[in-house]
Image: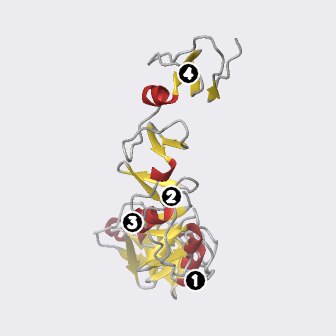
Amino acid sequence: MDIIRLLGKVTMADKFDCDHCKESLYGRKYIQSDDSPYCIPCYDSLFSNTCDECKELIGHDSRELFYEDRHYHEHCFRCFRCDRSLADEPFTSQDESLLCNDCYCNEFSSKCVACDKIVMPGTRKLEYAGSTWHEGCFICHSCEQPIGSKSFIPDKDEHYCVPCYEEKFAPRCMRCKKALAKGGVTYRDEPWHKECFVCTNCKTQLAGQHFTSRDDSPYCLKCFGNLYAKKCEACSKPITGFGGGKYISFEDRQWHQPCFTCSQCSVSLVGAGFFPDGDRILCRGCHSSL
């Protein structure tokens, strides 16, 4: 039997009925599904989807559109706000409603605070402190180059890339005159890089070390003692007085406290009477025995 299957017409004399309503399909259009023929009304009622918008069946001769598990007539597939056809347009679903891109952006998308234009869905953007920018609109206030994913520093309503901020606002080292990005040392209320704050004589870094100054110039304790401190009369080493070290001074001579002893018997003269004898100093007993 030669049967025209999809939307065909049966014109043969043999019995040929709709599988559902059993009415004859002779001379009528029909649709075959799973090897069974159906008249058009039965096929539509059995197999057609219901339009999610108008709730009517989507007939076999209608263009059917679907989104997720919802089906629509082509003329029902429209923007919920402006009623524009979405058949060949990009769209978005919001709370079960279909919206064209324009309506969605006007209602839900953020605006770039720099250009005041909508940040379209899917475009690259930057968000900071509750504001939104197009990626290309978020630029350094100084060099006007896009900051992108690089670090930046806010200053009131302005944003700076790190190099520009340091150039414009960061304090400058008193020695090298370059910006201090972080850390550093403060000496006499002036900023220094740690690596720039060194002994005036030997150039050893002084950050975290004990030091002193002369004529506003910093020195490590060793250099200061060697260059400027008076020498102990007994051991000839510098007397700096740093670190709580005590010393004895008599006329134009100085001694470390442990070095201030009798020149003859070596007894300590700290807190005791003594007698000068030329370059020597003597305790009372040694002086009496002369």
CB atoms at circles 1 and 4 under 8 Å apart?
no
Per the image, label 3 sits on a secondary structure element best described as helix
Q: Splitting the image into 4 quarters, where does residue 32 fall?
A: top right
Q: Is residue 287 above or below residue 87?
A: below
Q: Mark 2 points at which residue?
A: 85
Per the image, label 1 sits on a secondary structure element best described as loop
Q: Mark 1 points at which residue?
A: 142
Q: Position of residue 217 (x, y in %)?
A: 54, 83
Q: Where is residue 130 in the image (x, y as percent from the top left)?
A: 38, 67
Question: Mark 1 or 2 closer to N-term?
Answer: 2
Quadrant containing the C terminus in the rendered view: bottom left
The residue located at (55%, 43%) in the rendering is 63
Tell me the mark number nearer the camera, choosing from 1 and 2. Answer: 2
| 56 and 24: which is toward the camera | 24
Q: Position of residue 252 (x, y in %)?
A: 45, 85
* Numbered label attached to residue 107: 3
Could you give the CA–CA distance between mark 1 and mark 2, rounded to whole angstroms?
46 Å
Amino acid under label 2?
A: Ser
* Numbered label attached to residue 25: 4
Tell me the mark number nearer the camera, choosing from 3 and 2. Answer: 2
Could you give the CA–CA distance between mark 1 and mark 4, rounded to whole angstroms?
81 Å
Give the number of marks.
4
